[in-house]
Amino acid sequence: MSWEWRGQRRYYYRARRDGDRVIKEYMGPEGSVMAENAAEEDAKMRTTKAMLRRAEQERRQSFEVAQAQVTAMGRMVSDVVSDVLLAAGYYQHRRGPWRRRRK
């Protein structure tokens, strides 16, 4: 999607991918209604895609923040549970299940 110089004039081409190949569609010379409309459509499409990309990035960042908070809370709860079980006389054999000590 670009204006390309061919000799002394500019022409608008719309590029699309078909498998591994890039196919360019000729839209017209500078000043033609078809080329100008295609250029405006492509600019709007790029703007929309950029806004969607930004929104997705913000959503992902907020999710990562929430995930970090949940992970930290989980570690805190795990530490508290471990402390309570140790105080109650339990132990953990080789990081397995908690067991009660015999007296």
Image (cartoon, grey):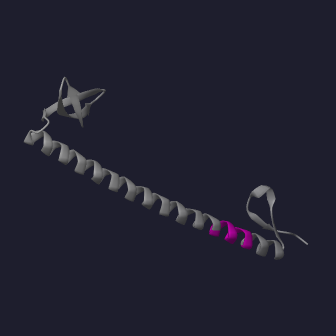
Residue at left offset 76%, top offset 69%: 82
Residue at left offset 15%, top offset 43%: 38
- Relative horizontal placement of residue 46, taking residue 90 as reference (left or right): left
- Depicted 15 relative to depicted 99: above or below: above
Find the residue positioned furthest to the right: 103
Residue 63 x %, y %: 49, 62
* Range covered by the magenta-colored residues: 73-80
Find the residue positioned furthest to the top: 7
Q: Nearer the viewer, residue 76 or 90?
A: 76
Residue 77 x %, y %: 68, 71
Total tally of numbered discs in the picture? 0
- Depicted 46 relative to depicted 73: above or below: above
Q: Is residue 64 in the magenta section?
A: no
Residue 72 x %, y %: 64, 66
Q: Is residue 76 in the magenta section?
A: yes
- Relative horizontal placement of residue 73, taking residue 4 as reference (left or right): right
- Relative horizontal placement of residue 70, taking residue 101 as reference (left or right): left
Quadrant of the snapshot with the C terminus: bottom right
Q: Nearer the viewer, residue 26 or 5?
A: 5
Residue at left offset 13%, top offset 39%: 35
